[in-house]
Amino acid sequence: MAATTPQSVHSDVSALPSGLQVFTAFPDVLMIPELIFGGLVWILVASARVIDPLSQGWIMFVSVTLFVFTFITLILYAAGVHKRKSLWTTFDAFYHFVSSLFYLSAAVLQAYVTVGLSYQILNDFKTYQLNIAAVVFAYFATFVYVIHAVFSLLRWKKS
């Protein structure tokens, strides 16, 4: 009996949650702030005047794509589609690692565009403020994705 207890505890730690446990299990509960911060980046960049179409296009692509993929992943986990298979743990670690890199690139580009904007905008202070807010939330999203990636990689290593 003593041999079965550590195995059951270990399998619970390394398995992806399903159902409503997704909203209480760490690091999967971080998908909620990922959606919030990603949605705010999306809204703020979309509502500001486009200064650098190529850079801001990448930022919009990253924020919209990762918002949609994170939402789909959250729904799939809540529905229990993964059936606690280790392949999904690998997917989770890979997805959040790549997402954190994408959001880091988007946050740096948004900061670059905003700094360049500070020299150009004299009459449009509202666009400047929207871009500053987008930078802040892009870095928040990056931070949350990095934390999720680290703990997903640890979970993957345990599985």
Image (cartoon, rainbow, N blue to C red):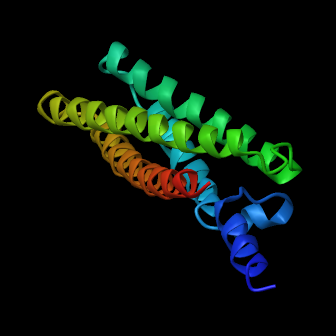
| Along the viewing direction, whichever of 44 and 25 lies nearer the viewer | 25
Q: Residue at x 16, y 27 (%)?
A: 120
Q: Residue at x 73, y 48 (%)?
A: 74
| Along the viewing direction, whichever of 31 and 154 lies nearer the viewer | 154
In the image, residue 21 sits, relative to residue 110, either above or below, namely below
In the image, residue 117 sits, relative to residue 133, either above or below, namely above
Q: Which residue of the protein is positioned furthest toward the top in this rendering?
A: 54
Q: Quadrant of the C terminus?
A: bottom right
Percent x, y of residue 17: 76, 60
Q: Quadrant of the N terminus?
A: bottom right
Choose top left, top right, bottom left or bottom right for residue 104.
top left
Residue 76 located left or right of residue 67: right
Percent x, y of residue 16: 71, 56
Q: Residue at x 58, y 28 (%)?
A: 65
Percent x, y of residue 113: 24, 29
Percent x, y of residue 112: 21, 32
